[in-house]
């Protein structure tokens, strides 16, 4: 039994869909193959049974033709017709002319039976089965005996229908089974992931107070002195605070009750830039901005997370004496100096745990959060790497296009 409270994250849902799709796809192919094999065997058995039944009737009729010839019976064909009134047959001579026709239909249509052998021949025509045999050896002038057994035009329709119903029933059962098997396989993973998430949420909650206290103390200390060491402490405290905010955003977003509202992007981005000015000063990076008035409807925490991650990413993957430029007009553009981003790496750069420079501190989560938020609000994210006048320095540009 499965717990109703069992929830799957995005990756587990993808794994579930892939497993069920692969399982159903392979099962579908296998069931179709079995169904076709069954239909083929069923039709073969039916045709073989029909041929055997007609062959038995033909043998009896042939035997009576020989007996009638040997005993010189008067009107032997009528005697045969009376005895085998349940059969549809025609008797042909060596020239394939009809000697006698008993309920066989239009005797002039028998030209297609003019075969030279080998005999017996069993034919499945549009509306009837036919058996052609030549074991009379010319008795009574009969060279060929042809038996006819009528059948409906759509003889195997009922068989096809039954097989289709069984096929759909089996496939539905396989589909349900595949879903429960996938859930069964994922349940231990989901349980362990839930346990880790609970532990992480508890840790994130407990870190809130000491990080806030550390940041307040660092700001107060910086106001009292301009010691570069104090600036380093403040920059480190802000970095820890930013890491905590990302952690909290990841683990507490399902608890948020915030509703989307119209945001003043100019003011919001300016606040994030101001919060990181001292960190930019500590890293010897020139941070500039040019912000136009812009509004957008969203949850404030989502946009704050998006902007702060773009800015932190620009500062972290920079170089002393470099720059970070922030522009806001129709889109938000964050440009920074740094190493070139290869074209082949741009697409994977927003994947979780993917990093361009593994020597830099980080976990490859920031741009993944940016990608998730862009997907949530149908925003377009573009990443470019452009050369500058300095051959050792490139300008990496991250653009987020807001909907009108």
Image (tube, rainbow, N blue to C red):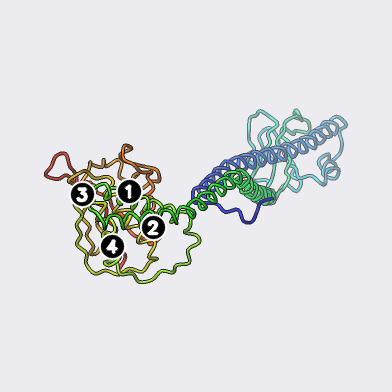
* Camera-side mark, 4 or 3: 3
Q: What whole-number distance in Å separates the C-alpha atoms at marks 4 and 3?
A: 18 Å
In this view, 60 is above or below 149:
above
**Residue 269 disc label:** 4
Provide the residue designation for mark 2. 373
Q: What whole-number distance in Å separates the C-alpha atoms at marks 3 and 2?
A: 27 Å
Q: What whole-number distance in Å separates the C-alpha atoms at marks 2 and 1?
A: 26 Å
Provide the residue designation for mark 1. 236
Q: What whole-number distance in Å separates the C-alpha atoms at marks 3 and 1?
A: 16 Å
Determine the secondary structure under disc 1: helix
In this view, 14 is above or below 402:
above
* Camera-side mark, 4 or 1: 1
Q: Residue at x 21, y 67 (%)?
A: 292
In this view, 52 is above or below 371:
above
Q: Residue at x 28, y 50 (%)?
A: 230
Who is closer to the viewer here, 13 or 293? 293
Provide the residue designation for mark 3. 285
Who is closer to the viewer here, 355 or 49? 355
- Number of residues whose C-alpha sits closer than 10 Å to that of mark 3, classed few (under 14), some (14–19) or many (20 or more): many
Determine the secondary structure under disc 2: helix
Q: Position of residue 227 (x, y in %)?
A: 23, 49
* Camera-side mark, 3 or 2: 3
Residue 5 in view (yes/no): yes
Who is closer to the viewer here, 78 or 161? 161
Q: Residue at x 44, y 56 (%)?
A: 208
Q: Are marks 3 and 2 in contact (CB under 8 Å)?
A: no
Q: Position of residue 299 (x, y in %)?
A: 40, 66
* Camera-side mark, 3 or 1: 1
Name, please, the residue furthest toward the front.
224
């Amino acid at each position: 039994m499965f717990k109703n409270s069992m929830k799957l994250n995005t990756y587990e849902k993808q794994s579930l869909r892939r497993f069920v799709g692969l399982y159903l796809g392979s099962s579908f192919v296998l069931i179709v193959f079995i169904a076709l094999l069954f239909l083929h065997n069923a039709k073969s058995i039916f045709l073989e049974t029909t041929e055997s039944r007609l062959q038995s009737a033909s043998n009896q009729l042939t035997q009576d033709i020989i007996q009638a010839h040997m005993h010189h019976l008067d009107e032997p064909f009528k005697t045969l017709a009376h005895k085998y009134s349940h059969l549809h047959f025609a008797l042909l001579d060596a020239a394939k002319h009809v000697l006698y026709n008993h309920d066989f239909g239009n005797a002039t249509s028998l030209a297609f039976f003019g075969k030279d052998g080998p005999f017996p021949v069993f034919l499945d025509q549009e509306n009837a089965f036919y058996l052609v045999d030549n074991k009379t050896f010319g008795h009574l002038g009969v060279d060929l005996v042809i038996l006819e057994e009528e059948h409906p035009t759509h003889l195997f329709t009922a068989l096809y229908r039954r097989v289709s119903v069984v096929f759909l029933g089996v496939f539905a059962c396989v589909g349900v089974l595949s879903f429960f098997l996938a859930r069964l396989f994922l349940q231990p993973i989901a349980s362990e992931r839930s346990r880790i998430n609970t532990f992480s949420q508890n840790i994130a909650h407990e870190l809130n107070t000491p990080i806030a206290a550390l940041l307040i103390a660092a700001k107060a200390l910086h106001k009292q002195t301009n010691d570069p060491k104090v600036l380093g402490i403040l920059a480190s405290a802000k970095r820890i605070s930013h890491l905590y905010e990302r952690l909290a955003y990841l683990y507490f977003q399902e608890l948020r009750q915030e509703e989307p509202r119209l945001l003043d992007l100019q003011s919001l981005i300016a606040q994030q830039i101001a919060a990181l000015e001292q960190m930019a000063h500590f890293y010897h990076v020139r941070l500039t901005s040019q912000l136009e008035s812009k509004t957008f409807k969203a949850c404030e925490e989502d946009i704050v997370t998006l902007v702060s991650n773009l800015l932190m990413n620009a500062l972290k993957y920079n170089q002393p004496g470099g720059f970070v430029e922030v522009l806001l007009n129709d889109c938000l553009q964050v440009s920074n100096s740094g190493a070139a981003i290869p074209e082949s790496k741009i697409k994977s750069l927003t994947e979780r745990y993917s990093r361009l420079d593994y020597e830099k501190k980080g976990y490859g989560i920031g741009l993944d959060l940016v990608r998730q938020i862009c997907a949530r609000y149908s925003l377009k994210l573009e990443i470019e790497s452009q050369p500058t006048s300095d051959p050792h320095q490139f300008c990496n540009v991250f653009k987020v296009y807001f909907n009108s």
